Image (cartoon, rainbow, N blue to C red):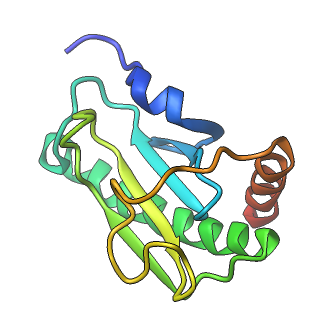
Amino acid sequence: MGEFALDPRITASSHAVASLALSELRLQDDGRFPWAVLVPRVAGAVELADLPWADQIVLLEEIAVAGRWVRAVGAVWGLAVDKLNIANLGNVTPQLHWHVVGRRAADPCWPGPVWGQGTAQALSEGQIAAARAAFAGLRP
């Protein structure tokens, strides 16, 4: 299977936040939405079923953590989250990864999907720092 490495498309479109037990937690570079990307550190994984059962359970727990973090990011950015969209697509980037997107009725894509809609707004250094601080505030 080889050694784990982040797909360059994920690296180019997101910012590192934290290494969780199984996954890398990243912030999608789009200021329109508080948006987490979770990438399990499992070489060659493409589908959820590629993970051992125990890792699937850990991933589910990490998705819940990412959801709490996305809501916290929305709060510090002034973009209150009404609904979390959680998805695993992989059509463009096959490496197993999960999106946790904070949505609100006033967002530019509501109620449709965020993928392929409009133009991403690059995050400022202040937004990135605030998002990282929000994660640090979630830790026990």
- Viewer-proximal residue, 99 or 62? 99
Residue in view at x 47 percent, y 59 percent: 62
Please state the horizontal and vertical placement of residue 97, each as a whole percent of the image: 34, 44
- Considering only vertical position in the picture, is 38 above or below 12? below
Quarter containing the C terminus: bottom right
Please state the horizontal and vertical placement of residue 75, each as a whole percent of the image: 76, 77
Position of 44 compared to 78: left or right? left
Quarter containing the N terminus: top left
**Residue 6 seen in the current view:** no
- Viewer-proximal residue, 87 or 33? 33
Please state the horizontal and vertical placement of residue 19, each as a whole percent of the image: 59, 39
Please state the horizontal and vertical placement of residue 123, each as a whole percent of the image: 71, 47
Position of 83 compared to 55: left or right? right
Residue in view at x 40 percent, y 19 percent: 5
Residue in view at x 64 percent, y 66 percent: 69
- Viewer-proximal residue, 125 or 64? 125
- Considering only vertical position in the picture, is 31 above or below 15? below
For this orientation, the residue located farthest to the top is 2
Position of 9 compared to 11: left or right? left
